[in-house]
Image (spheres, rainbow, N blue to C red):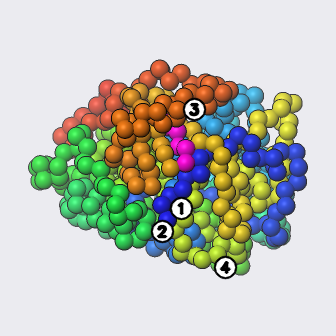
Amino acid sequence: MTPPRLFGSLTMFLISGLAGAEAEPPAPRPNVIHILLDDMGYSDVGSFGGEIETPHIDRLAREGWRFRHFYNAAKCEPTRHMIQSGLYWDDAQPLKKTGWPTLGHVLRDAGYRTLATGKWHLAGMEPTSVGFDRFFGHLSGATDYFHGNDSWRLDNAPFTPSGDFYGTNAITDHSLAFITETHTDNPSQPFYLYLCYSAPHSPLQAPDEDVAKYRGRYLVGWDRLREQRYQRQIELGIIEPDWPLPARPANVPAWDSLTPEQQEFEDHRMAVYAAMMDIVDRNVGRLLDQLDQLGIADNTLILFHSDNGASPYDRSRAGKLGQARSRWNLGVAWANATNTPFRNYKRNASHGGSTSPLIVRWPAALAEPGSIRDDALNIIDLFPTFVKLAGGVYPNHFAGQPTQALPGLDFAQLLTDGVAPVRPEPMFFQFKNHAALMDGDWKALRDFGGPWELYHLPTDGTEVHNLAATEPERLQRMAETWETMANNMTARRNFTNPDHVIGPPKFISVDGRPNRETAEGPSAATQSK
């Protein structure tokens, strides 16, 4: 496997074939199913090194491609804005006040049936008012898995969960119903399904029988689990053998230093998380079965990834772990393990926050199924790619205003013909005072407003060896480029405005209380996060 080539970044001009002109789509145009998970760690699924049982997701990997360099916005809502607007988070923010064309708008105008299910988390709008024909899910950032919250909707009408409701299953139920409805009404009409599972985002909740399947498996502890995942990733070819595994961070205690009571609690906590992932996998299996039954699997493009890295925060603790109406979180120690081989977490610009495992399956188009790809792609590339595949038009004007050019990279030809895109400008990252710039093989980053660091990714893909002292001129150029790109954003975020998370979160075990100083926000499970 060749070292990763990052191709620079999100180009500011590669939409010339989209804005105002008809694209040349493949014939027939594919259905698109975009599966987005929430706060999933990089190494959770089996095909990326995890021990959690994910045979259906791993089937996608066997029959498709795995991208080991796929980058996100490091946070739930920014990633979703970038997916649906095609713009950087900084540019998408002011536009939501006046409207802009979403993927739903553009693909529906291209003749697609547009469907959305699951977690929406775009404040101030509902899917059926921004281009989607059908919607089932919740508008909030998190929800009780057994009882929901008051933001659940069926289309634009309130939906009250009842009976044996479990959020992940219900999201799939309606996804399957929407696909069947579309296929029955017009079998020749392609569809776009934006399928956003809340799992494994907090609160950690799963049926007892699913949790019982994993109880005891995590008494090996996070230190050994992390090493096991790291070794499997090397064997699978997900990472290079010379990429070092970062040391256990100072805010995570050694597993052997815990009391037996603490170890039992932590085993239970991780078992609930694993059960939530297991349930997602079973539901992906249901989806694949339906595509096979309808005879539409071959020309359906499926993408599977997470919105950001695993979340380390212990915001609240209420109720019985795993049960309905409880509020428990994964915590920093297990988040560190699930993000193997990277360091740091959700919110951070380092790889642990900004890198997702991406699996793409499209039997009718992809050559060499089972391949692991080194192409560096970004969440912002999805919009122009989907529009190109749909033969759509990104409008020059929308709601009476001129639109911004899409900055993302169209990688449709990579999927259809194996032609790798070339990215002429660096990738830009910012959330609060976490920032990064990726330019070719190099990445400059700073988390929590600290000093800029510099990493050579082909030889150090886990960001362990900071080369800031040995490459000061390169780092200075990259920092200046980041500032230039940031200042060109419509809504320049003030980098001096610190994240309200003060620093790396503290470890809290069974006998601890939530740390309000490092809490990410309101503790209610229904709050947006």
Report whether 213 appears left or right of 177.
left
Earlier sequence position, callout 2 versus callout 1: 2
- Whether pointer 2 and pointer 1 mark residues with C-beta atoms closer than 8 Å, the reply is yes
Query: SS at mark 2?
Result: loop
Q: Which of pointers 4 and 2 indicates the residue nearer the eye? A: 2
Q: Which residue is mark 2?
A: 1
Specify the segment rendered in magenta: 435-440
- Whether pointer 3 and pointer 4 mark residues with C-beta atoms closer than 8 Å, the reply is no
Query: SS at mark 1?
Result: loop
Image point 77% across, 46% down: which residue?
Answer: 15
Report whether 62 appears left or right of 391.
left
Amino acid on which the number 2 mark rests in the picture = Met
- What distance separates the C-alpha of mark 1 from that of mark 3? 24 Å
Q: Which residue is mark 3?
A: 481
Earlier sequence position, callout 3 versus callout 4: 4
Query: SS at mark 3?
Result: helix
Image point 22% across, 40% down: which residue?
Answer: 250
Image point 84% across, 30% down: which residue?
Answer: 401
In the rendered image, residue 478, in percent from the top left (x then y), is placed at: 52, 35
Residue 293 tag number: 4
Amino acid on which the number 3 mark rests in the picture = Thr
- What distance separates the C-alpha of mark 4 from that of mark 1? 33 Å
- Whether pointer 2 and pointer 3 mark residues with C-beta atoms closer than 8 Å, the reply is no
Of residues 370 and 172, the one drawn nearer to the viewer in this rendering: 370
Q: Which residue is mark 1?
A: 374
- Image position of 495 with respect to 417: above or below: above
